[in-house]
Image: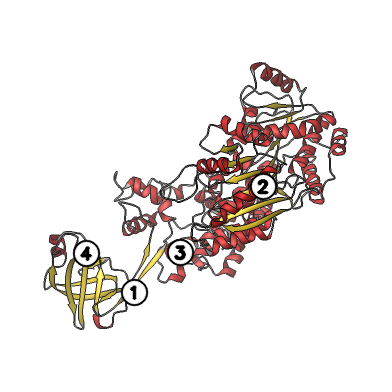
Amino acid sequence: MRPPILFPLFAEVATLKGVGPRVLPLVQKVAGPLVRDLVFLAPAGLIVRRAMQAATATEGEVGVFQVTIDRLFPPGRPGAPLKVRAADETGFVHLVWFGGSPQHIDRLLPRGKTRLVSGKVERFNGEVQIVHPDIVAVDKADDLAMSEPVYPATQGLTARQVRKLVQAALPAAPDLAEWQDPAWLAKQKWPGWRAALEALHSPSTEAELAPDAPVRQRLAYDEFLAHQLALARRRRAREIKPAPVIAPGAASDHLLAALPFALTNAQAQAVAEIRRDLASGKQMGRLLQGDVGSGKTAVAALALADAAASGFQSALMAPTEILARQHFEKLGPLLEAAGVPSVLLTGRDTNGQRREKLAALASGAAPVAIGTHALFQDAVRFDRLALAVIDEQHRFGVGERQRLQAKGDPRLGAVHLLTMSATPIPRTLELTQYGELEVSRLTEKPPGRTPVTTAVLPLTRIGEVAARLKAAVESGAQAYWICPLVAESEAVDLAAAVDRADDLRRLLGVEVGLAHGQMPGAEREAVMADFADGRLPVLVATTVVEVGVDVPNASIMVIEHADRFGLAQLHQLRGRVGRGAKASACILLYGGQDGALGETAKERLETLRRTEDGFVIAEEDFRLRGGGDPLGLKQSGFPAYRFADPIRQRALMLAAADDARLVMNRDPDLASPRGQAIRVLEELFDWKAHKAGSD
């Protein structure tokens, strides 16, 4: 229940004076639907004004001049500016408008009257000029602040209007009991929460806008703490849920013996961590992450075998039918050798096949189900589901994962959850996005994986690359060719996948497949299946191949306009080759006709050329992208922080995570005075409504 003291902050912005039907959608777009959202809207910049005189005015700065209006010069022709000449005792100040009504300007600046004008100083023919003055006032009391915070704006709502609305919203923020640890607060020398909010909206210097400013740090820490507490609560809620006890047995031993390779040290450690969770009698929530080819599937297979050995069922869910089918083709024989029957359930089964498989699951005759979204459809019933394994978990929503887990029998306890990701995640992002999960990392590749030679070339050498590709294809190689667009765009001069496929067909004299996101799913997967089965030597594609097809024979990856892709995405694409015994190559083509390459793009491509370690690449990508949209994951549950920046303020986030763990260990019911204040903090940020991370 939200405490009444927060009710004014959680009122609709429409309750504020000046927010009528026209302005309401604009305010909601800039800030959000609540008064709190305006209060939490941090200034993006600062205008610092300085009193000046015409003779000594500094060009480029924002000046305030007290002037007497001399004369108005209307535009002499269409498109010409309207000018007003004014003066102080040291010289002229020329005010210029492009557009606007002469009558309005004449009323605003009547001849012979004294006015205060403010704007950015320019010099034209040696005299001071201000184009579109930002303020014209009768005296200083007329809203002429010498320092003015600048807020985000939108069409129809100016930054100054937003500022007035923020000031109108601020009184709704009450004085609240302190939730931070007193010793920590004293050490940091931070102000209280209400004082920090006031200071946030009244900066006097640019330094006060920086992430390391005390006010910004205080508010960022509050936000980090609220989020980490939400994650800690979810972790605790999971840890106290009884779940089936799963232990290794004969099936697990048989499967381990059937594997065509020995486990790496990292795989063995991950298996041990998963088995510890499964045997605890409490619900497991674990993320298994590692590069493409690091052996996640083998680790998951042992967990599936452990569940079968303990008399339970498990389900492995993949985002696409082709990936589910590949899992089934790879795991089915291994599980069968271990005495564990499995079924493949997808949306394309015939009615007869589907009935047979559903019966096997409902009776328990099939201990393992491998499939797509079809696994959580209403018709699917399990006898004793105890473990859900989600591959490429970021491709599924929280609700979809929960629907699969809900297939378990409550009398057996909660269904264990193992999620897998082939996108290595920086530790910072791991803490913000998956803080409620335990994490296992596979940092080694199984033996037999061939290194991928990576070359970085200008796009001007594309003809040479195509000629080398022709020779490779003629000798039996398979290749991917990745394009960033599906169709020609006038706005962005990039080669389209459709046109590139046509070009390569003519040049190579072979059939070239085409796969992109605008194709119907079944058609796209059919093309990718043809490539996987060796019927197509070349596949031109957009980034739909980033996750999915396992084609051991594919040994060449060409990526056009590689400088337009994110580093983690490039690494994922490169991971499509080097999956077999053949020597493999990745060619990164960059730049336009001039071959120019920006510094950040150069760093990205050089990092990729230098290392194949996905965790090193992920950290570098996170650093280069900054806090705007780390790894492009905002659409995948990345926290939408208002004050906090997990890159620049990583130390604060780690401190908040420690603080949250300490609070939950010492006062799990939040019954102490500090615990009561923390309850208000949790409601203030309302992270439970954000569904951050994987829930």
Please tell me whether mark 1 or mark 2 is closer to you in this view: 2
Identify the amino acid type marked 1: Glu
Identify the amino acid type marked 4: Trp
Identify the amino acid type marked 2: Ala
Left or right: residue 507 versus residue 195 is right
Please tell me whether mark 2 or mark 4 is closer to you in this view: 2
Is label 1 in a helix, a strand or a loop?
A: loop
Instruction: Tell me the distance, in whole angstroms, between the alpha carbons under discs 1 and 4.
Output: 19 Å
Give the vertical position of 254 relative to 670 (above or below): above
Q: Name the residue under label 2.
A: 471
Q: Name the residue under label 1.
A: 61
Residue 154 spot, x, y in % from top left: 35, 53
Instruction: Tell me the distance, in whole angstroms, between the alpha carbons under discs 1 and 3.
Output: 30 Å
Name the N-terminal-most of marks 1 and 4. 1
What's the colour scheme? secondary structure
Name the N-terminal-most of marks 1 and 2. 1
Residue 413 spot, x, y in % from top left: 72, 32
Please tell me whether mark 1 or mark 4 is closer to you in this view: 4
Going 70% across and 34% down the picture, which residue do you hit? 326
Which of the two residues, 13 or 137, is positioned nearer the viewer here? 137
Left or right: residue 565 versus residue 475 is left
Name the N-terminal-most of marks 1 and 3. 1
Instruction: Tell me the distance, in whole angstroms, between the alpha carbons under discs 2 and 4.
Output: 65 Å
Q: Is residue 279 visible?
A: yes
Q: Residue 195 carries which label?
A: 3
Q: In which quarter of the image is residue 49?
A: bottom left
